[in-house]
Image: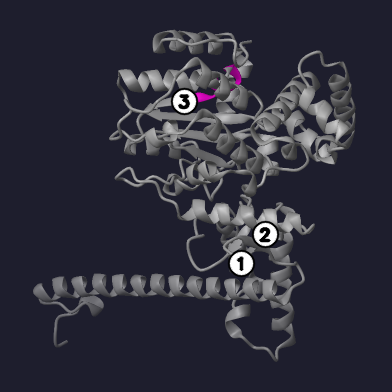
Amino acid sequence: MTTPGEETLPLSPEALDSLMAREVSQLSFIDRSSIYEEIHGVQSLAIQETPELIRQSLLSFQHEIDIFRGKKSAYDDAMTAGSRYVCSNELRIKFLRADFFDPKKAVARFLLRLENLFDFFGPVALQRPLQYSDLGRKETELLRKGFIQILPTRDRAGRLVEVANFRTEFWEADKDTRAKVIMYFEDAISEDMETQKNGLVVIVAWDDRLNMAAGISTTQEDYDVMVRVKASTPYRWSAVHICVPEGPLSRLYRAFILLTFGQESRVRARVYPGFNMETQYKLLTFGINVLDIPITHTGSIKLKNHLQWIKTRRAIDEARKQGVNFAGTLHPGTNDVLFSKGGNQNHHGNYEFRSLIENLLSQERYKNVFISRCNRCTSDREQRESIRYEIIRQIRARGGRFLALDKGGWWVELPIESSDLHDRVATSVYDHQKRMEARQKQKRTKSDTQDMSNGANTDLRMDEGGFCFSGFRPCGS
């Protein structure tokens, strides 16, 4: 299997196409089918975890570090400095999951990551997760322009989606600045448990109308830095979508990007001719919410969600400095129920929430129990309480949480026994029951109108024949 860095520039687009075809053909039929299904979000290749597997894997991980023959000076420096962060199981398990619990591969990735952290950020990066304050002026300016963003919604498989809109200005930045911004994103993304287990979905988009001729650096030095960073990513890429327009320069850019990915990511790549409407329709079939992709129809970058993401990351940093856990949630899970003003109707958890309410209200014992609003009726009060607890129980059983939008712009979980949660659930049930009543009334009205219309037409035909509709008797009889 080809490893990142094994290829060298220059490699023509034609040679890369041949390389990718050969890599796919080397896979077994079962592997190809499994990768295909994972790309579409139908299944995950993640290893089923057990406490025993994790315990044994962590022991093997340390053993592989002890016998590692390559460069591990950053690790040795961290041990000398007494770094608890580098020794933490929380950090090491990320790399084990990224390599399907293969300790040898995971350790190679882990040690390279430590070398990169030390080289680009210094010894402080071996003591704790990266923070926004670790970025310099050039890095923060590049970060805030939104060339790389995390979508606010997950795909249908619950995976985070990263959009890399590598425009000319991104490539005009020096290679170290680009690498530090990418590594900061990687560190933040790796904190998401679903991403650790099921991987990240990556979209590389380049708008058709933008100039690709200027500013694209494809030197061997740039390539080597990109390969180093990609090879040490603390999670895997489970699907890659390359959206680059056709043309000689475009194909060169596409070849450079794909070459840095390594075989594990290339066999999961799909290539499209630009980021146009047709491409967006294709991305929809992979369960990606294209409406959240931060690119307008004119090619501009949308920054609202991205700036909120940065704000939340800084709040997380501040909480860690104070030694407390951040109470917010950056990316709601697929099964979470979101309470906020509009915009969440299409969230999968909210859809399931509405379906659950409708199913329960269709049961005879719950019909009209919220519409009646009879607070003095003991039976009605008990039924309202019963349906609230049943809804909460079923959502929790699916692994979902109830989240409300905080004034800071992030999501916070509502405690199960809180009156706030029960009031929100009760209001949702009441509103849904009112909507169901309105739909039923509308159907009855439409049916009655249709009957009257049919009757009027019948009367008109009978009258023209000289008969009344009732009993087909002659008029006047």
Residue bearing the label numbered 2: 328
Q: Which residues are magenta?
A: 263-270
* Residue at the farthest bottom position: 376
Tell me which numbered mark, 2 or 3, is placed earlier along the sequence.
3
Foreground: 432 or 295? 295
Q: Residue 304: x, y in percent? A: 46, 55
In magenta stretch: residue 210? no
Q: Residue at x 76, y 36 (%)?
A: 126
Residue 366 figure quarter: bottom right
Helix, strand or loop at disc 1?
loop
- Which label number is shown at residue 406? 1
Q: Find the distance from the CA under tag 2 to the CA under tag 1.
A: 8 Å
Amino acid type, residue under disc 2 in the picture: Gly
Mark 3 nearby-residue class (10 Å; few <14, some 14–19, many ≥20)? few
Q: Find the distance from the CA under tag 3 to the CA under tag 1.
A: 37 Å
Q: Tags 2 and 1 in contact by the CB under 8 Å rule?
A: yes
Q: Residue 312: x, y in percent? A: 61, 56
